[in-house]
Image: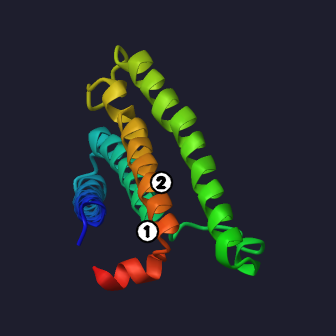
Amino acid sequence: MNALAKLRKGIDKILSYACAIAFALMVIVATYQVVVRYVFNSPSTVSEELLTYSFTWMALLSSALVFGKRDHMRMGFVADKLTGTAKVVLEVVIELLIMLMVAAIMIFGGYSIVQLTMTQVTASLGIPMGIVYTIIPISGILIFVYGILNIIDLCKGVEHEQRDVKE
């Protein structure tokens, strides 16, 4: 297995574990919230805020994982009709457009919003909002890296089904 495949597999594994941990945390916190609210009649604002932020983190990390596996939703009515070099060129252009959008909005814009909100504090948890928003540039960087790996795979002629079988 070459270095790029090992890199992809490592990122996949880390993201999978991070998403599983975030989901497990959400189940525990939601259970706590229900028990505290309905059994003890004392709602917890901390758990509500923690659930919101952990759901956001899990959603963005899992979308990066899905982009890496090239299993994201797409309208394939044009791409599925193409074959050979034309299909590869179209898929590379699509990956480049995704990378351009991710670089502009998630990485640059996300970094800007993190800097801007580092002085604001969350209502219940009391942590800087910038920490909450760090997931935006982090997931943007991951999607960008996956885009590079996807383009390399496309140029080598490795389909995502073939890549999954080799792992």
Q: Residue furthest top?
A: 119
Report if residue 144 is visible in the image.
Answer: yes
What residue is at 42 percent from the left and 83 percent from the top? 162
Report if residue 122 is visible in the image.
Answer: no
- Structure colour scheme: rainbow
Q: Nearer the viewer, mark 2 or mark 1?
A: 2
The dot on residue 69 is 1
Nearest the viewer among 158 and 19 is: 158
| Residue 75 in the figure: left or right of residue 117 | right
Q: Secondary structure at mark 1?
A: loop
- What crowding class fits label 1: few (fewer than 14 Cα within 10 Å), some (14-19), or many (20 or more)? some
Q: Position of residue 63 (x, y in %)?
A: 45, 58
Q: What amino acid type is highlighted by mark number 2?
A: Gly
| C-alpha span from label 2 to label 1 | 10 Å
| Residue 141 in the figure: left or right of residue 9 | right
Residue named by callout 2: 147
